[in-house]
Image: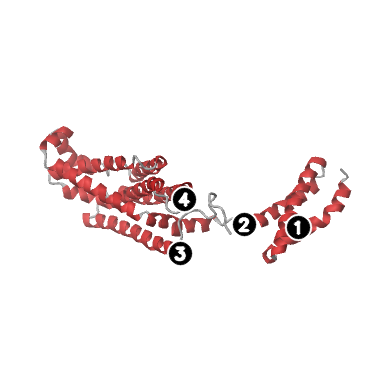
């Protein structure tokens, strides 16, 4: 290929594309169409030059022009800070708000099961004996239960708690892949663990100690677990009742919602872990420690309700923009 003749023949096209790229903010509809067409043509020119010429300056010039034109055609990416802001002000809260009834149902079911089981354990010596010996129960209620929160350095304990809590919530998210069917069992297992501790503490008149140590971090921690459970089970229900959409579209949207909740709960559980490591074992009076837990819970619920309700009124779903399974219609 005669490079000089090639450059002479196509330079006007390259110059025109360069002009359109530089003025892309003020292009008319026809000029936008021209920009797309010239971008495709110049990309072809670049491919031809790369295969037939060793002129690095020409290859470099066309490469830069094609890259700039590609940016103009495809549009600039949204800044990361703006995507992050949208996630925490729209995506996460609206997904959580839309799942509020599933979330509430998980909470009520957990509390009912835990309360019934704790009452049963507290009032039945035979059940207590099947769990541990009287000496072990005394050791638990007098020392072990409280020492659990202070026997490790706060920073490492916070990391350990965060990982453990994240794993429990992650199970809810992972089980969404099998339509949330195992989630009720996971909730039951966690309710059983809480109930056994509460029942044993109540049997020795230490229920005030139990709530004084559980409530500061447990309110936010369990709320995160209930939210993950609610969203996961909602995904399973989508298979049964997809609404006016095709089932595959409804599942795709709800699946992306589950992932949004998973990412948001990383932050929620991090805060819960900090409270458990630094507030729960602290020397603050019980009312102050519980008050911090209640405040954290109210802030989170208020955040979800305020931002979620506002986003829902704007018909936001929390789904990604230009979702790949949704085709544009005229």
Q: Quadrant of residue 137?
A: top left
What is the distance, in whole Å, between disc 3 and disc 2 at their CAs?
25 Å
Q: Earlier in the sequence, mark 4 or mark 1?
A: 1
Is 192 above or below relative to 246?
A: above
Residue at image coords 82%, 44% = 55
Say which of marks 4 and 1 sits in front.
Answer: 4
Label 2: which secondary element: loop
**Callouts 4 and 2 close, C-beta under 8 Å:** no
Q: Earlier in the sequence, mark 4 or mark 2?
A: 2
Q: Which residue, given by chain and number where applicable, does mark 1 sit on?
A: 17
| Residue 90 location (% of width, % of height) | 45, 59
Q: Earlier in the sequence, mark 1 or mark 2?
A: 1
What is the distance, in whole Å, between disc 3 and disc 4 at their CAs?
17 Å
| Residue 147 location (% of width, % of height) | 24, 42
Q: Which residue, given by chain and number where applicable, does mark 4 sit on?
A: 253
| Residue 302 location (% of width, % of height) | 34, 61
Label 1: which secondary element: helix
Q: Which residue, given by chain and number where applicable, does mark 3 sit on?
A: 314
Is 47 above or below relative to 87?
A: above
Q: Which residue, given by chain and number where applicable, does mark 2 sit on?
A: 76
């Amino acid at each position: 290929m005669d490079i000089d003749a090639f450059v002479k023949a196509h330079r006007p096209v390259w110059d025109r594309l360069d002009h359109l790229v530089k003025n892309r903010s003020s292009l008319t509809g026809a000029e936008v169409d021209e920009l797309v067409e010239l971008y495709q043509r110049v990309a072809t020119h670049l491919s031809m030059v790369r295969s037939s010429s060793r002129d690095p300056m020409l290859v470099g010039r066309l490469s830069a022009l094609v890259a700039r034109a590609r940016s103009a055609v495809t549009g600039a990416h949204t800044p990361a800070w703006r995507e992050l802001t949208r996630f925490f002000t729209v995506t996460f809260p609206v997904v959580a708000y839309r799942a509020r009834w599933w979330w509430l149902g998980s909470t009520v079911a957990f509390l009912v099961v835990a309360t019934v089981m704790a009452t049963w354990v507290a009032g039945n010596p035979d059940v207590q004996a099947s769990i541990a010996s009287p000496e072990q129960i005394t050791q638990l209620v007098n020392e072990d239960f409280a020492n659990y929160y202070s026997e490790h350095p706060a920073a490492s304990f916070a990391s350990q708690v965060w990982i453990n809590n994240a794993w429990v919530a992650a199970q809810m998210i992972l089980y969404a892949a099998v339509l949330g069917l195992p989630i009720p069992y996971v909730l039951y297992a966690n309710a059983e663990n809480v109930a056994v501790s509460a029942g044993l503490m109540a049997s020795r008149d230490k229920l005030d100690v139990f709530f004084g140590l559980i409530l500061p971090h447990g309110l936010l921690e369990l709320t995160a677990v209930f939210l993950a459970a609610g969203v996961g089970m909602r995904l399973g229900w989508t298979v049964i009742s997809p609404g006016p959409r095709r089932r595959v579209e409804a599942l795709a949207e709800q699946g992306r919602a589950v992932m949004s909740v998973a990412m948001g709960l990383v932050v929620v559980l991090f805060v819960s872990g900090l409270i458990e490591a630094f507030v729960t074992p602290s020397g603050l009076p019980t009312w102050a420690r519980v008050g911090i837990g209640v405040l954290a819970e109210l802030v989170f619920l208020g955040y979800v309700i305020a931002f979620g309700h506002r986003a829902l009124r704007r018909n936001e779903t929390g789904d990604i923009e230009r979702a790949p399974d949704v085709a544009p219609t005229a």
